[in-house]
Amino acid sequence: MKICRTKAEMRSAVCAWRREGATVALVPTMGYLHEGHLGLVRLARDKAERVVASIFVNPTQFGPNEDLETYPRDEARDLALLQAEGVDAVFMPGVAEMYGAGGDTFVEVPGLSAILQGALRPGHFRGVATVVTKLFNIVTPDFAVFGEKDYQQLAVIRQMVRDLDMPLEIVGHPTVREADGLAMSSRNVRLSAEHRAQAGVLSRALARAQELAKAGADIAALDAAIRDELASAPAADVKSVDIRDAETLAELSGRLERPAVVLLAVAFGSVLLIDQQVISPDT
Ligand code: PAF
């Protein structure tokens, strides 16, 4: 497995594969890998002959009061996990290599970035869209695999790729969960034991929403039932509950007539957990 710390090393590895006619899939990550990331890697493996994983904790997507400094990191463990999955190359640049000095260009999908998580984290999706564009330009993948857990991020990236005619396919991977339903996330290790024991409430609230959607509940009833379930966890600080059109993320009201996505943001202490599920009146 090649370890590329510079853009030049990464480009030359991809160039050599291209000369052999190989296809390339990219799995962008911020490291501290878990089973959820490894699912993305396995899907990338199914899609292309060569797989690149990137590990880069991207400063431009963190707000001034967010957890950039404390974001968990474990390079040696990440590399061992990627090697065991048969990844061909890992791109792990430092911040200076990735952004250089004097950069002044950003990529923004303003509509989708200003709502929901974007309203809570101004500038976040601009940072994501910019770094993902840079990764696409450096690795030039045929496929890039992202988790559906970050539903809004995936929607932003899909729109960006469509709007800017980026020549690759975006592939979504279903959320990978712990035994109690908690969506896997690098942030989960920062939950205290007490908070970890309560964190399964997000997936229980989503399951309840799906049941009620099937039974014909309207948006207001779904919202009330989700909040009720979340309130059963005493430490859950509910930041947002949104039920939106599954495709456009537009607001919905009244009867649920087509697939919607439920998006949750719930803090336990200083750890913000997000989760999502597509619900539909007829599944
Ligand atoms: O989902 C993430 O881990 C990050 O937002 C991404 C896509 C790697 C960009 O930094």
Image: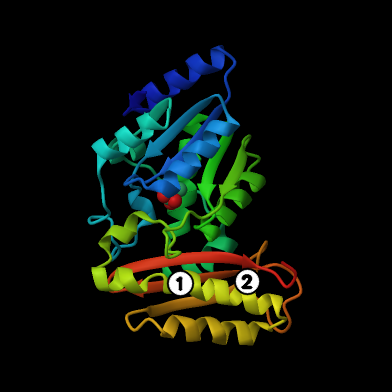
Give the numbered dot on residue 124: none
Compare marks 2 and 1 and give the one earlier in the sequence: 1
121 on left or right of 69: right
223 on left or right of 245: left
Residue 73 in sight in this render: yes
Residue 119 in sight in this render: no
> What is the CA distance from the residue labelled 2 to the residue labelled 1?
17 Å
Report x, y in % for residue 88. Answer: 43, 25
For this orientation, the residue located farthest to the top is 20
Tag 2: residue type? Arg
121 on left or right of 157: left
Quadrant of the rendered image containing residue 243: bottom right
- What residue lies at 28% left-to-right and 60% top-to-bottom? 67
- Using the image, determine if residue 125 lies above or below residue 18: below
- The residue under label 1 is 202
Per the image, label 2 sits on a secondary structure element best described as strand
Mark 1 surroundings: few (<14), some (14-19) or many (≥20) residues within 10 A: many
Q: Quadrant of the N terminus?
A: top left
Report x, y in % for residue 259. Answer: 70, 67
Report x, y in % for residue 78. Answer: 31, 39
Tag 1: residue type? Leu
Mark 2 surroundings: few (<14), some (14-19) or many (≥20) residues within 10 A: many
Report x, y in % for residue 106. Answer: 47, 48
Quadrant of the rendered image containing residue 65: bottom left
- The residue under label 2 is 244
Q: Is mark 2 within 8 Å of ligand 1?
A: no
Instruction: Tally the numbered discs.
Output: 2
